[in-house]
Image (cartoon, helix red, strand yellow):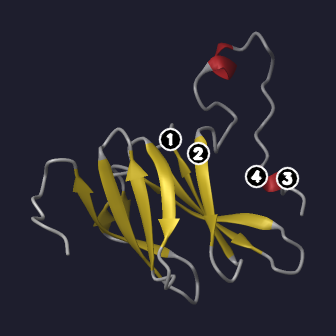
Amino acid sequence: GAFPSSLAPPECPSSADPACTQEGYGRPYQGLSQIVMSADGLQIYGVSFLAASLHVFTRSNVTGAIALADTITDGTVHRGRAVDGLSGAFGVALSDNGLAVYVAGYRDQAVAAFDRDPSTGMLTFVDRVKNGERVFGTWK
């Protein structure tokens, strides 16, 4: 499917406009470093390193068209929970059972965990684990 025009970046007013040279201007997904699709093909999850964000897209199985459904950003409150662990987001994984999404945050040196509603694909922040913050002992 074609990239929807609603997600296209706005045009720079002119090449002389200094705002056009700022990081991220007119590029809502600049730094998007990895994506993963749900098993049913109805959601796509992508992480943005520069925006410290996790983007949730819906996808039509008929046309392949995608639309932005949600953006979760480090340091914000989302669905009543303070989100942490997404700074420098660069990796995203969907659990085998489709009930969780995990994001690696390079700058936070963290892994953030989200519950996933299998019927809608929407996410809720659960927790994050930062480097050196917790001692887990031996895994078996």
Q: In which quarter of the image is residue 17?
A: top right
Q: Earlier in the sequence, mark 2 or mark 1?
A: 2
Q: In this view, does 111 lie to the left or right of 98?
A: left
Q: For the residues marked 4 and 1, what is the alpha-carbon distance in whole angstroms?
A: 18 Å
Determine the CA span between mark 3 and mark 2.
21 Å
Task: Please tell me whether mark 3 sits on a helix, a strand or a loop.
Answer: helix
Determine contact: label 2, label 1, CB under 8 Å. Answer: yes
Measured in 3D between alpha carbons, the distance from the residue under mark 2 to the one under mark 1, in whole angstroms, is: 7 Å
Q: How far apart are marks 3 and 4 (CA)?
A: 5 Å
Which residue is denoted by mark 1 in the rendering? 49
Task: Name the secondary structure under disc 4.
Answer: helix
Q: Pointer 2: residues within 10 angstroms few (<14), some, or many (20+)?
A: some
Query: Looking at this view, is 69 or 111 the one in front?
Result: 111
Residue at 12% x, 58% y is 134
Nearer to us of marks 3 and 2 is 2
Res 84 seen here: no
In x, y percent, where is residue 48? 54, 46
Image mark for residue 7: 4
Tell me which numbered mark, 3 or 1, is placed earlier along the sequence. Answer: 3
Quadrant occupied by the C terminus: bottom left
Q: Where is residue 60 in the image (x, y as percent from the top left)?
A: 80, 76
Q: Which amino acid does label 1 sit on?
A: Phe
Count of numbered circles on the image: 4
Q: In which quarter of the image is the N terminus?
A: bottom right
Q: Which of marks 4 and 2 is nearer the N terminus?
A: 4
Specify whether residue 92 is in view: yes
- Name which residue lies at 46% across and 83% down: 99
* Residue at 59% over, 38% down: 31
Furthest residue toward front: 140
